[in-house]
Amino acid sequence: MEKEIKDLLILLKNGKFIEILKKEKDLVKRFPNEPALFDILGITNVFLKKYEDAKMSFEKALKINPRFFQSLNNFGNLMYDLKEYNNALKYYKKALENKTKSTYHNQNFKYREVYNNIANVFNEIGSTEEAILNYEKAIEIDPDFYQAYNNLGNAQKRLGLLSDAISSYQACIRINPNYHLAHNNLGVAYYDIAKIEDSLSSYNKVLSIKPDYAPIYWNLHGCCSSIDDAEKLLQKCVYYDQNFLKAKYCLSFIQAYKGNFNNYNSMLNSTHENNPYIRSFQWIFSLPKLPELYFSRWLFFDKMIKISKKERPFYEFGVWTGLSFRYLFKYFDKGFGFDTFNGLPEKWYNEPKGFYSGLGKIPEIKGANFIKGEFNKTLPVFFKKKREKASIINLDADLYTSTLCALENSKEIIDEDTILIFDEFIINDQWENDEFRALNEFCENNKSKYEVLAFSLFTKQVAIKLKLKK
């Protein structure tokens, strides 16, 4: 049986799935009690997207041997792919509990994979700290497991631990210098801390390794200062991946922004018309005056800083790890930041309650003024005392309720020179019910209007000035 299994594994490695299925009936008759045979059939059916057949194959393998490691792990992988995360965890944990000798995997290899798989599940269900612990277990088993370092970096980045994430990506690259995903992720992490040159260096490394990797062109367009350069990069992105829809959407918008509405109108008259990107574009084109278009978060901030009254303080609602606060604070003598530092007070899209907590740590920024607590408790107390008018107010609370609370409590520091920056204003699935709704409700409550100064499709930011009632 050992030779037959090896032959099947060679076929599996080479993607010869139909040939495996052709051999199935004869092999099952000859070896009805061999779990490895049914396991390989299960994997084959997964590749062929015959998920019910795959389930039955893994179940047969486990009926023969309930402790069969490969099928416990592979059944977990199938459940993960089907987004049945609790079942995936159940099978992965059983695999760890039943450490039987593998018939066709190196022992060291297989247990590192299970811990990595468990971590992936925790990532999906929002238990990022648990994910980190399991990635670290995988790396402890195999210090050369470069994919786990990359995954660990992604989890650390998700928690805002960017220095740790950068170290993890660098460790991955030291083990495998040609792993393009790690170079790409390293570039994103550098971008997030405003190290644009380092970011571009990492992105260019991806281009040298895998020039047909479409996401790199999407990321590069987010560094552009020129609309023409951004358009060319998006064209390359779509060229390499026709299904990269957000690049298609943004390309059609840029062309319309420049005066050519052909592709944009085609989008409006298609099944894409209700996509949040298209709805965002429609709102932008409905404005009395077309605002300035930006791609880079940091160039966006630079322009708003340049036109602001820098002798005034800035205020930020929603600080998290302090990335934007730290960037803005370089240009102002005084800054005030408000956050619970315990994360989201309620679920927001795929982000669970408590996410964006920064692990409860207040950023260490010399001279910064941070006010910790829920907005509805801290803001009335803070603004009871007369405060200086704001140069910039950066609203990064995401939620409708939190954003409206911030606006209503801070209205005494807002005048027609104050620039309000909203960090998640457009593009999200239900963006009309988040910061957009809060701003419009605030304006209605206070009989005000607003002018949109600038926006970014890449970062979802919008900057406005209020037109206050005289």
Image (cartoon, rainbow, N blue to C red):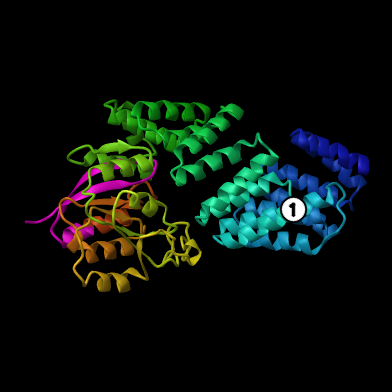
Q: Would you say 5 lies left or right of 264 here? A: right
Residue 458 among those drawn in magenta: yes
Residue 133 percent across, percent down from the top left = 65, 60
Residue 55 percent across, percent down from the top left = 72, 53
Q: Would you say 151 lies left or right of 142 here? A: left
The quadrant in which residue 111 appears is: bottom right
Identify which residue, 54 or 157, lies in the foreground.
157
Residue 423 percent across, percent down from the top left = 35, 51
Q: Is residue 204 visible?
A: yes
Residue 468 among those drawn in magenta: yes
Residue 344 percent across, percent down from the top left = 42, 64
Q: Would you say 194 lies left or right of 407 here? A: right
Q: Which quadrant: the C terminus? A: bottom left
Q: Residues within 10 Å of mark 1 (few under 14, many from 20)?
A: many
Q: Which residues are magenta?
A: 441-470
Identify which residue, 79 or 383, lies in the foreground.
383
The quadrant in which residue 288 appears is: top left
Q: Would you say 297 lies left or right of 82 here? A: left
Identify which residue, 254 or 55, lies in the foreground.
254
For the residue labelled by badge 1, is the local secondary structure a helix, a strand or a loop?
helix
Determine which residue is flagged by label 1: 112
Identify which residue, 95 or 7, lies in the foreground.
95
Is 133 located above or below residue 167 in the figure?
A: below
Kind of residue at disc 1: Arg
Q: Residue at x 54, y 60 (%)?
A: 126
Q: Residue at x 87, y 46 (%)?
A: 28
Q: Is residue 266 visible?
A: no
Q: Which quadrant: the N terminus? A: top right
